[in-house]
Image (cartoon, rainbow, N blue to C red):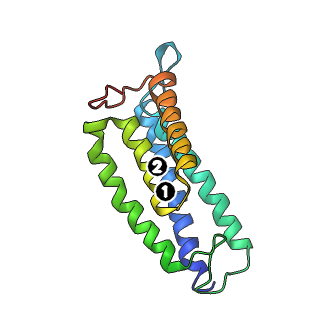
Amino acid sequence: MSGQRSPQVAVFGGLALVGAGFAVSAVGYGVMLPESRIGPGFLPLVAGGLLAVFSVLLLVEQLRRPAAPEGGTDDFGRTPAQRMWILRRVFALLPAALLAVPLVGMVTAFGLLVLVISTWLERRKVLPALALSAVSAAAMHVIFAVVLRVPLPTGLFGF
């Protein structure tokens, strides 16, 4: 394995193990409740299972693909330094979004997070980024509040 491939293999392998661990432990919380209602373990089971499956698929793809030359650019022309800059900003934005939840609510905080990542980090145009953030926030509301009936934290706006 080359120096470029080894960390990716380790990350995908680790994510597969973490996802499998979440999926297995979720069963103990109860996946289904009486009257065919979704239990508290349903979301961790689905999320952990999807994380494990997609990580294994990426791991297999990574092992089959020839190693990329060190220091190359990605499909969008970004260097490793630029990708690391973006990653650091995303990790800084996540706690900021969580701190905003009590003020503006979960749906709004998530929509704003998507908007900031799209415009500032990914350098997308404002109108498509606004559309993406609105659709993402609406999807989050529909999936959690309407379909799964999970009460989401609301802020000053009541949603």
Residue nearer the viewer, 46 or 120: 120
Callout 2 environment at 10 Å: few (<14), some (14 to 19), or many (20+)?
A: many
Q: Which residue is mark 2?
A: 115
Q: Secondary structure at mark 1?
A: helix
Across the whole image, how many numbered discs are drawn on residues?
2
Q: CA distance from mark 2 to mark 1?
A: 6 Å
Q: Amino acid at mark 2?
A: Leu
Local crowd size for mark 1, using a 10 Å CA cut-off: few (<14), some (14–19), many (≥20): some
Residue 133 x, y percent position in the rendering: 50, 43
Q: Are marks 2 and 1 in contact (CB under 8 Å)?
A: yes
In the rendered image, the vertical position of residue 35 relative to residue 113, given as above or below: above
Q: Is residue 149 above or below residue 139?
A: above
Position of residue 4 relative to residue 62, above or below, is below
User: Label for residue 119?
Assistant: 1
User: What percent of the width, then of the height, locates residue 2?
Assistant: 62, 86
Q: Which quadrant of the figure contains the C terminus?
A: top left
Q: On the rendered image, what quadrant is the N terminus found in? A: bottom right
Residue 31 can be seen, yes or no? no
Horizontal side of residue 105 vs 140, given as left or right: left
In which quarter of the view is residue 151 placed?
top left
State the SS at label 2: helix
Q: Which mark is residue 144?
A: none
At label 1, the amino acid type is Thr
Residue located 53% across and 17% down the image: 36
- Residue farthest along the top direction in this orientation: 35
Q: Residue at x 47, y 62 (%)?
A: 121
Q: Position of residue 103 (x, y in %)?
A: 25, 38
